[in-house]
């Protein structure tokens, strides 16, 4: 080993080599990482002397890192473990089968089947059957009664089929997500120094002893000790729950922990713990059932809880587990977890997430249909039993004989099975399946369109998007910055000047300033292909400046080699508040020189001198500055260039060392060296994509940190601003002035005046972006609640991404923090991929509607047939097994066939559906009823007159174990044929004529329809007794098929009837808006004597019960929020009360301030004029809102005069409580 360690390390290794290869054990390092601040420093001091000593013991060099030799890396992996947290084992197939068996209807069927089997084996004593009533008699030869068990067995078999299909679906879904997970993880890379070179390696390859470079926006992948830092601030809330950013320095607190976010600055750390031994890893092993018994169990427990609360805060997941105590942790979701990265783990658990809009509507619909089915099946059973009893004991007057009891029981069981089949057919189990398949399929296909979906329902929400707030840099533009103009030495060059034209003294200062005052992680690399453009690595604006150096025929790398990062005296890194970056060098004579660069309008205000043509500095007065803004900066900006000012300042040695912490004094009195105009060309496909969006009813707004003139120029190039339109372009300052009242509080009414016309928001801070998104989402001026998508790449975009309905993060330029907060990652950073996402989102919605249209037709018909048939003929024309087969076609297969329809461009020609657009439109209702009428007519005709038409024996009133009849087989076969052809009808839901349009683009659909047909032939011809079928002749088959084909012709007839004529049609499957009726607001509504949808649907008692439950939960939540040591807004993220189906959150995700807009949406059913009264009802009396929406109470209840800190996007909680 010693041969590949560094010479400096060899000598110090002698005494340190007391155990194994390295100078410290896993346990020592692990206990070291559990200390914080001064304790940690003392420990490092006692054990290793200093960080250099620690590096020596780990055989690594702070400058050159590890050698990177495979043998060394392997050794470290075996000694200290890999940076990989083993995923939780996936559920086995058997577990999934067991879960599928828990389904209520299936359990009922199983019971029925078992009873039926048991009875079929029971032989009553050979008494004369006649005395038990004629119903039991009839021709029943020996082999017939032998076959009595077949029905029970067949039901069991079909139950097994359903269970296996469900389990297999779940299993493949799980597998897909694991694949997605691992893909997200493999893409995560981190910069480390190996052999003196900075290289990017996958996070899993990091080993103990690596020197990792941390920078703004990183999610730390392992624990480590800081060995060099500039202005480093870390958000440790994911571990400690404290939301304040922690300053990290070598002197005070050098401990960096995995899973925390770098919010500011940069630095280097030596990795001391990876994988399961890192802080995040320890917590995960505890969660995963504590494979690692640990002496610090207590410490970890505490951390684990905090971490989990935090995770709840961060992750956009809500688990439907009511928290009774901060410690009643949601262990359940964690069991189904996997994935390496702490945060990523949560993402994989999709099903436990908050219900999205679509799921809310569907669940409600399913419950309604289910209830109806239950009632129907109960009635069926009762009628059958009553008829039987009346017939046997009253009409025939049979006495009650003991020997006959088994016979009677057998009848009752048969009735019971018929009832259950009615129920089974009525309950649309296929719904969840259709949704899952449709979403999973879309997600898979969206990967090809460069959309990496992290939350399934984001895909569906995207279809409803009405507004997109997009970043400029990198999304609308190429994010390949180049300097194209410069103002230097009193001359404005329209293209990059030749180096001869610039005084050498100015050139030297300029090149030195650019080289040291750009992050050392930013560099220009040689092009990948011959003749290609040079590759830009790191911050693109800095790349432009480094490229400017190269254009001036100077090499910045030489300067960086002379002044390595360790020699920089102090660095003020760029952040969204400073909008500038400065680096201080200590000169040989003891004086200091500071280089600054930043947005020109900000830095020019701090300049008091400027370098002239002869290289001297002359005074730069405010008057000169205004001139420069007019003559240089505005012309550059109006061409869409971003302007950057470069300056410097000397601190003479005689004045002693300045107070570096007093930033305002330090960053003043600069000398301006030059102003450059940086061009970032618009992506060629963006204007077209934006046109598509506008045509699809989606407003695109640009929110950028850039100068307003630059922003306006780019917006015009993209087509966001059309010449001659009456639209607003505002700067952040002006925007804030307009939306705040005299007290400085944000008022929703004021935002409502601005956002409909606002198209460009320039020089905006992250808070402005968040305020705008929140303002649009909470707004009630439009007739529908706006659904907002936001794109972002920087750490500062996190809050807005979380708040938005759908957050898009940039896959290439995005920081880890942005990706964490997002729902979809654009792997190519391209705006046109968002348009694809919209298309897929709308497609999901349509697919589900198609499926519903098909499913409900079958439901209605099957239920009515089974019901009336049973009541009139005492026997269901469709037998249990046949029903289950129909159920399989219409649920599982149809959901596969209809949910995988590919999207077409036509989807972008209509306006977005609103949040309360019903799932079943009136056109669909017309189709469902129309086809229902056709199918019922045919089936009843066959049922009651079929024997005459086909000249066969009647199948009605058959005895108990009678053989299957041709008559009933024809009924069953015709029924299935009609469903098959109707499946083709169901492909169109907007009343289009051509139902075959694009049918061959969907091979799955074709194969399923064809496959079902083949199986049906097999069932009818060879199904025999289990399927209660008899083989049919060719003639009979042709008749069945013809009657089925009739439904296509009938479909044409239906689509000729204009929907507008049919006033009686109702829509179904509205999403009940959470905004319309939060349960707590029902009280307010009652005070106003207003009836609401929820009132009608839920009975009084239920409402009171839910309300009581809600209230208790809220109180518990409030108590918890204060009991837990963590940040106050933790209380906001508790799961909503899930007791009522009307309470599904209409938000697909959960955001930083996860409160709902409690201003009810004025639906078309509400009286318009109640709006003001409702709006003011957002008072702390809405008990739930007291915590859930503290932040909303501020902007929306300005009347209450609550003092608030408008500067922070998270308004403080105490004020409103």
Image (tube, rainbow, N blue to C red):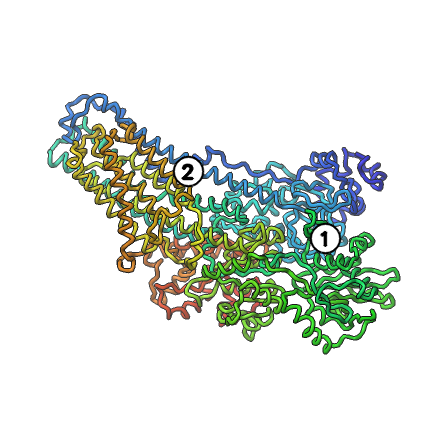
For residue 1118, side relative to residue 284 (left or right): left
* 492 over 83 or under it: above or below: below
User: SS for tag 1?
Assistant: strand
In the rendering, which numbered label is found on residue 871? Answer: none
For residue 711, side relative to residue 325 (left or right): right
x%, y% of residue 164?
41, 34
Q: Residues within 10 Å of mark 1 (few under 14, many from 20)?
A: some
Q: How many numbered discs sit on the rendered protein?
A: 2
- Image quadrant in which the N terminus is located: top right
x%, y% of residue 514?
76, 60
| Foreground residue among 988 and 1100 | 988
Measure the C-alpha gap from mark 2 to mark 1. 53 Å
Which residue position holds label 1?
Answer: 524
User: SS for tag 2?
Assistant: helix
| Foreground residue among 732 and 1202 | 732
Depth check, mark 2 against mark 1: the one in front is 1
For residue 471, side relative to residue 1026 (left or right): right
- State whether residue 537 appears in this view: no
- State whether residue 1081 appears in this view: yes
Q: Quadrant of residue 1083?
A: bottom left
| Foreground residue among 812 and 779 | 812
Q: Earlier in the sequence, mark 2 or mark 1?
A: 2
Q: Which residue is drawn at the image coordinates 33% and 37% (left, top)?
A: 108
Which residue position holds label 2?
Answer: 166
x%, y% of residue 326?
54, 50
């Amino acid at each position: 080993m010693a041969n590949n360690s560094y010479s400096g390390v060899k000598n110090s290794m002698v005494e340190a080599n007391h155990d194994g290869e390295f100078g410290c054990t896993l346990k020592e390092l692990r206990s070291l990482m559990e200390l914080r601040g001064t304790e940690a420093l003392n420990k490092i001091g006692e054990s290793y002397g200093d960080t250099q000593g620690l590096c020596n013991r780990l055989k690594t060099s702070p400058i050159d890192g590890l050698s990177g030799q495979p043998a060394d890396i392997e050794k470290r992996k075996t000694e200290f473990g890999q940076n990989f947290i083993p995923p939780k084992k996936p559920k086995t197939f058997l577990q999934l089968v067991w879960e599928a068996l828990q389904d209520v209807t299936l359990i009922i069927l199983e019971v029925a089947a078992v009873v039926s089997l048991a009875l079929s084996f029971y032989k009553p004593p050979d008494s004369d059957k006649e005395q038990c009533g004629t119903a039991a008699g009839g021709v029943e030869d020996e082999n017939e009664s032998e076959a009595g068990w077949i029905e029970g067995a067949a039901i069991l078999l079909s139950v097994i089929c359903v269970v296996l299909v469900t389990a297999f679906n779940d299993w493949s879904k799980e597998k897909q997500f694991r694949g997605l997970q691992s893909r997200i993880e493999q893409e995560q890379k981190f910069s480390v120094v190996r052999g003196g070179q900075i290289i990017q390696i996958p996070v899993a390859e990091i080993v103990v002893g690596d020197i990792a470079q941390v920078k703004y926006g990183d999610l730390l992948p392992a624990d480590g000790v800081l060995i060099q830092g500039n202005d480093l601030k870390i958000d440790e809330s994911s571990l400690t729950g404290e939301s304040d950013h922690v300053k990290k320095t070598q002197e005070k607190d050098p401990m960096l922990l995995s899973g925390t976010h770098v919010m500011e600055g940069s630095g280097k750390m030596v990795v001391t713990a990876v994988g399961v031994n890192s802080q995040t890893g320890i917590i995960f092993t505890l969660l995963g059932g504590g494979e690692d018994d640990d002496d610090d169990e207590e410490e970890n427990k505490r951390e684990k809880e905090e971490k989990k609360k935090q995770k709840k805060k961060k992750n956009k997941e809500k688990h439907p587990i009511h928290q009774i105590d901060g410690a009643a942790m949601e262990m359940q979701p964690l069991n189904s977890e996997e994935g390496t990265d702490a945060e990523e783990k949560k993402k994989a658990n999709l099903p436990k997430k908050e219900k999205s809009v679509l799921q809310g509507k569907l669940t409600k619909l399913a419950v309604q249909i289910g209830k109806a089915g239950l009632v129907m099946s109960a009635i069926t059973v009762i009628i059958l039993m009553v008829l039987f009893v009346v017939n046997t004991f009253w009409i025939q007057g049979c006495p009650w004989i003991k020997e006959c009891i088994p016979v009677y029981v057998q009848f009752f069981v048969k009735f019971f099975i018929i009832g259950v089949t009615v129920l089974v057919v009525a309950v649309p189990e296929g719904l969840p399946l259709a949704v899952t398949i449709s979403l999973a399929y879309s997600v898979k296909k969206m990967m090809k369109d460069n959309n990496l979906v992290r939350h399934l329902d984001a895909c569906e929400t995207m279809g409803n998007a009405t507004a997109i707030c997009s970043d400029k840099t990198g999304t609308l533009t190429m994010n390949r910055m180049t300097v194209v103009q410069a103002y230097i030495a009193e001359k404005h060059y329209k293209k990059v000047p030749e180096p001869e034209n610039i005084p050498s003294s100015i050139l030297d200062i300029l090149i030195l300033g650019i080289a040291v005052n750009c992050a050392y992680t930013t560099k220009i690399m040689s092009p990948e292909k011959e003749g290609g453009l040079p590759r830009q690595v790191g911050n693109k604006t800095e790349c432009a400046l480094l490229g400017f150096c190269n254009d001036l025929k100077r090499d910045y790398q030489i300067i960086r080699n002379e002044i390595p990062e360790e020699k920089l005296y102090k660095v003020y890194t760029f952040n969204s508040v400073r909008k500038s970056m400065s680096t201080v060098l200590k000169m040989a004579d003891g004086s200091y020189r500071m280089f600054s660069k930043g947005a020109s309008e900000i830095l020019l205000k701090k300049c008091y001198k400027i370098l002239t043509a002869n290289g001297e500095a002359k005074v730069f007065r405010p008057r000169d500055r205004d001139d420069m803004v007019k003559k240089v900066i505005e012309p550059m900006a109006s061409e869409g260039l971003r302007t950057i000012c470069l300056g410097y300042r000397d601190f003479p040695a005689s004045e002693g060392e300045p107070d570096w912490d007093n930033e305002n004094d330090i960053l003043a009195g600069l000398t301006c060296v030059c102003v450059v105009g940086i061009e970032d060309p618009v992506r060629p496909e963006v204007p077209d994509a934006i046109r598509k969006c506008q045509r699809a009813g989606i407003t695109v707004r640009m929110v950028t940190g850039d100068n307003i003139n630059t922003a306006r120029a780019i917006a015009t190039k993209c087509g966001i601003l059309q010449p001659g339109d009456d639209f607003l372009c505002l700067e952040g300052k002006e925007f804030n002035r307009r939306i705040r009242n005299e007290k400085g509080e944000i008022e929703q009414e004021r935002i409502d005046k601005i956002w409909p016309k606002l198209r460009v928001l320039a020089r905006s801070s992250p808070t402005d972006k968040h305020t705008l998104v929140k303002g649009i989402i909470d707004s009630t001026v439009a007739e529908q609640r706006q659904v907002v998508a936001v794109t972002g790449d920087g750490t500062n975009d996190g809050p807005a991404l979380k708040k938005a309905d759908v957050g898009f993060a940039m896959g290439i330029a995005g920081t880890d923090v942005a990706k964490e907060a997002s729902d979809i990652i654009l792997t190519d950073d391209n705006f046109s991929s968002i348009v694809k996402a919209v298309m897929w989102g709308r497609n999901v919605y349509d697919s589900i509607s198609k499926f519903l249209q098909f499913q409900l037709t079958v439901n209605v018909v099957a239920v009515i047939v089974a019901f009336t048939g049973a009541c009139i003929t005492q026997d269901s024309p469709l037998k249990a097994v046949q029903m289950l087969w129909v159920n399989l076609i219409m649920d599982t297969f149809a959901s596969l066939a209809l949910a995988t329809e590919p999207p077409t461009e036509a989807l972008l020609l209509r306006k977005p559906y609103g949040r309360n657009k019903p799932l079943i439109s009136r056109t669909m209702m017309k189709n469902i009823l129309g086809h229902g009428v056709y199918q019922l007519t045919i089936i009843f005709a066959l049922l009651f007159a079929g024997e005459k038409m086909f000249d066969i024996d009647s199948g009605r009133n058959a005895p108990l174990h009678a053989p299957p009849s041709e008559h009933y087989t024809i009924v069953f076969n015709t029924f299935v044929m009609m469903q098959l052809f109707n499946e083709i009808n169901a492909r169109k839901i907007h009343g289009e004529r051509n139902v075959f349009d694009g049918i061959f683009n969907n091979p799955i659909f074709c194969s399923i329809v064809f496959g079902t047909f083949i199986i049906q032939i097999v069932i009818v011809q060879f199904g025999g007794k289990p399927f209660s079928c008899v083989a049919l002749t060719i003639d009979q088959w042709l008749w069945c098929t013809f009657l089925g084909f009739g439904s296509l012709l009938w479909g044409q007839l239906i689509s000729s009837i204009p929907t507008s004529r049919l006033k009686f049609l109702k829509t179904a499957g509205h999403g009940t808006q959470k905004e319309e009726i939060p349960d707590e607001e029902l009280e307010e509504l009652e005070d106003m004597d207003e009836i609401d949808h929820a009132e009608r649907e839920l009975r009084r008692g239920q409402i009171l019960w839910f309300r009581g439950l809600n209230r208790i939960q809220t109180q518990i939540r409030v108590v918890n929020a204060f009991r837990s040591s963590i940040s106050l807004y933790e209380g906001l993220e508790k799961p909503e009360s899930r007791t009522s189906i009307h309470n599904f959150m209409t938000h697909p995700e959960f955001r930083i301030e996860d409160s709902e807009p409690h201003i009810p949406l004025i639906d078309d059913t509400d009286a318009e004029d109640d709006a003001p009264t409702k709006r003011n009802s957002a008072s702390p009396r809405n008990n739930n809102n007291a915590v859930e929406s503290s932040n909303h109470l501020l902007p929306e209840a300005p009347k209450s005069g609550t003092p608030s800190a408008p500067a922070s996007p998270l308004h403080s909680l105490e004020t409103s409580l």
